[in-house]
């Protein structure tokens, strides 16, 4: 087996594996963060849609009252 001298170039297998593990950890953390953000945005969208539905109903009721009183 050859010994690596001071002039040898490249990365060892351990260094490469360490880089891969770090990238996987960062990817997992990012995926978790994005999933939480998407869940929150979907909940917010549902709340806004429900609010808009109520506003539409109130507006149509008001319009009906105005038309009936004329």
Image (cartoon, rainbow, N blue to C red):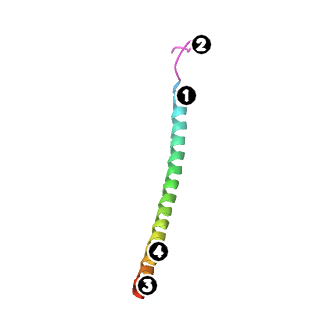
How far from the left and from the top, in percent, is residue 10? 52, 20
Crowd band around label 2 with a 10 angstrom C-alpha radius: few (<14), some (14–19), many (20+): few
Crowd band around label 1 with a 10 angstrom C-alpha radius: few (<14), some (14–19), many (20+): few
- Give the CA distance from mark 3 to mark 4: 17 Å
How far from the left and from the top, in percent, is residue 11? 53, 23
**Secondary structure state at the residue bearing disc 4:** helix
- Give the CA distance from mark 3 to mark 2: 90 Å
Ranked by sequence position, the earlier of labels 4 and 1 is 1
Out of 40 and 57, give the one closest to the viewer. Answer: 57
Out of 8 and 37, give the one closest to the viewer. Answer: 37
Task: Give the labeled residue for mark 4.
Answer: 54
How far from the left and from the top, in percent, is residue 40? 52, 59
Ranked by sequence position, the earlier of labels 4 and 2 is 2
Up the image or down, 1 lies above or below 57; here it is above
Task: Give the labeled residue for mark 1.
Answer: 15
Crowd band around label 4 with a 10 angstrom C-alpha radius: few (<14), some (14–19), many (20+): few
Up the image or down, 10 lies above or below 27; here it is above
- Give the CA distance from mark 4 to mark 2: 74 Å
How far from the left and from the top, in percent, is residue 9? 53, 16
Task: Give the labeled residue for mark 3.
Answer: 65
Q: Is residue 69 left or right of residue 3?
A: left
**Secondary structure state at the residue bearing disc 3:** helix
Question: Residue at coordinates 53% horizontally, 50% vertically from top-left?
Answer: 33
Task: Give the labeled residue for mark 2.
Answer: 6
- Give the CA distance from mark 4 to mark 1: 59 Å
The secondary structure that most of the magenta stretch takes on is loop
Ranked by sequence position, the earlier of labels 3 and 4 is 4
Residue range (magenta): 1-11
Crowd band around label 3 with a 10 angstrom C-alpha radius: few (<14), some (14–19), many (20+): few
Ranked by sequence position, the earlier of labels 2 and 1 is 2
Instruction: Kindly check if marks 1 and 3 are in contact, taking CB atoms under 8 A apart as contact.
Output: no
């Amino acid at each position: 087996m050859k010994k690596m001298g001071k002039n040898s170039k490249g990365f060892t297998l351990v260094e490469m594996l360490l880089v891969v593990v770090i990238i996987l950890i960062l990817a997992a953390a990012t995926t978790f963060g994005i999933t939480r953000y998407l869940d929150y945005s979907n909940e917010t969208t549902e709340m806004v849609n429900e609010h808009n539905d109520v506003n539409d109903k109130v507006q149509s009721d008001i319009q009906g009252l105005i038309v009936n009183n004329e």
